[in-house]
Image (cartoon, rainbow, N blue to C red):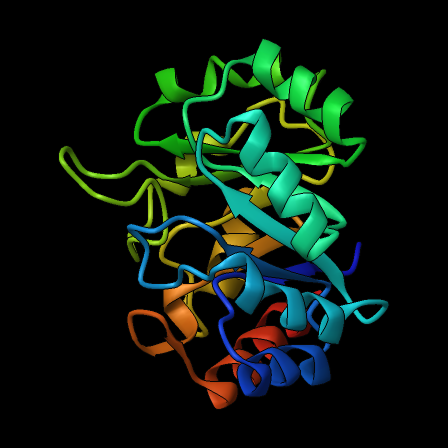
Amino acid sequence: MSPVCVKICGLSNAATLDAALEAGADLVGFVHFPKSPRHLSFEQGRSLAEQAKGRAERVVLLVDPDDALLAAAIDALDPDLIQLHGRETPQRVAAIRRLTGRPIMKAFGVASAEDLHALSAYATVADRLLLDAKAPPGADLPGGNGRTFDWALLRGAALPTGTMLSGGLDVENVAAALDSTGLTAVDVSSGVEIRPGEKDPTKIAAFIAAARGHS
């Protein structure tokens, strides 16, 4: 069985980042989206990205970024991966990949089988797909809302290798999520927090252990 790949997203300080790195996170995510309680300025992100360099893949999460924002993110964080969590079209994803020279993770909100129909158009232009619970109507955040979706929707779906599962995961349900979907990559944010935006080192370590224990 393939080892489970774990991403801890929305890290915002040196202590919790170090906890994620020490626990063996494969990817660490930094959010640059002002509406999010996990938002980091590029100056805040710079030191954290430097701290994680060479220890895990560094991911910057952006929402519908223009070229100027992309350039600023690259300059500040030098990310290993760019996560796009907005309404970016396949053409825009391809353009961002060309412009930045960085691998792209494209996030999708899932609530029904119809939401999976768009995946094939992105699978050829993004390096990794991330499936998250679709945000409720009127939500300020496209993800990180602590909601799961019906994992049964993924049974029999043709998903690219490396597709990552997100949305409401925590230490209690991550093993069941992996069993149900057959995926081997998971992303967590709110599920390892004490309150929105504040990660818990103990929960981070427990989540990674639970995910890896499954493999």
Residue at (48% x, 21% y) in the render: 88
Residue 4 location (% of width, % of height): 71, 60
Residue 179 horizontal side relative to residue 59, left or right: left
Which quadrant: the N terminus?
bottom right
Asked if residue 102 is positioned above or below residue 57 in the image, the reply reads above
Which quadrant: the C terminus?
bottom right
Residue at (56% x, 88% y) in the render: 15
Residue 25 horizontal side relative to residue 30, left or right: right
Residue 107 horizontal side relative to residue 147, left or right: right
Residue 111 location (% of width, % of height): 30, 31
Pick the front one: 130 or 196 = 196
Pick the front one: 155 or 204 = 204
Residue 16 horizontal side relative to residue 97, left or right: left
Pick the front one: 140 or 179 = 140
Q: Work out whether residue 52 can be spotted.
A: yes
Residue at (31% x, 25% y) in the render: 112
Asked if residue 171 is positioned above or below residue 160 in the image, the reply reads below
Residue 29 location (% of width, % of height): 58, 59
Q: Work out whether residue 182 can be spotted.
A: no
Residue at (62% x, 46% y) in the render: 73
Asked if residue 82 is positioned above or below residue 5 in the image, the reply reads above
